[in-house]
Image (cartoon, rainbow, N blue to C red):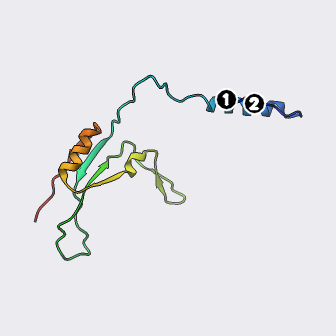
């Protein structure tokens, strides 16, 4: 552990407060002996529809694995931004086949839902 030294001066209380904050932030966040908790998020496996700007049929569309939101997004009314604390909503994994996506979800022990492809 690092040792903190205080400089001499009138701001001794500010230095003590800083030292308390630093020592609190250096403590380990989780115990290493405890097992890792599982992710309770639900993954959705689907094949996205083709772009409406194309007229040809697309035969090579990848299967996507995306996570459903657990927390609704937060809207900043001043700037019009949307954000949130759910970082899994940003994850999008692509797979060549449906079976590969399902195998990945089972290997990672994820809860998943498969949405079948709509054919014409």
Which residue is at the front of the view, 78 or 3?
3
Tell me the quarter of the picture where residue 117 sits.
bottom left
Q: Quadrant of the C terminus?
A: bottom left
The residue depicted at 49 percent of the width and 24 percent of the height is 31
- From the viewer's perspective, is 48 left or right of 81? left
Residue at x 80% of width, y 30% of height: 13
- What residue sits 64% from the left and 29% below the top? 24
Tell whether label 2 touches label 1 (CB within 8 Å). Answer: yes
- Numbered circle sitting on residue 53: none
Q: Which residue lies most toward the right here? A: 9
Cα gap from disc 1 to disc 2, whole angstroms: 9 Å
Q: Position of residue 90 (x, y in %)?
A: 39, 52
For label 1, count other residues whose C-alpha is less than 10 Å away and answer few (under 14), some (14-19) or many (20+). some
Residue at label 2?
4
Q: Name the outermost residue toward the left.
A: 120
Identify which residue is drawn at 23% across, 75% down. Answer: 54
Of tags 1 and 2, which is closer to the observer?
A: 2
Relative to 43, say whether 17 is above or below.
above
Instruction: Check disc 1 and report the residue beneath it.
Output: 23
Q: Earlier in the sequence, mark 1 or mark 2?
A: 2
Residue 4 drawn at (x, y percent): 75, 30
Q: Looking at the rendering, which quadrant does residue 33 occupy?
A: top left
* Front-lying residue, 95 or 67: 95
* Quadrant of image for the N terminus: top right
Viewed as shown, does residue 87 lie left or right of 98?
A: right
In percent of width and height, residue 40 lies at 33, 36
Residues packed near mark 2 inside 10 Å, few (<14), some (14 to 19) or many (20 plus): few
């Amino acid at each position: 552990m690092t040792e903190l030294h205080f400089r001499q001066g009138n701001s001794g209380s500010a230095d003590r407060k800083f030292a308390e904050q630093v020592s609190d932030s250096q403590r380990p966040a989780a115990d290493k002996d405890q097992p890792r908790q599982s992710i309770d998020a639900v993954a959705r496996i689907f094949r996205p529809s083709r772009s409406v700007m194309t007229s040809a049929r697309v035969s090579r569309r990848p299967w996507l694995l995306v996570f459903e939101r657990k927390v609704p997004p937060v809207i900043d009314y001043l700037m019009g931004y949307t954000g949130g604390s759910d970082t899994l909503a940003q994850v999008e994994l692509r797979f060549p086949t449906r079976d590969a996506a399902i195998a990945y979800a089972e290997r990672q022990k994820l809860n998943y839902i498969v949405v079948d492809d709509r054919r014409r």
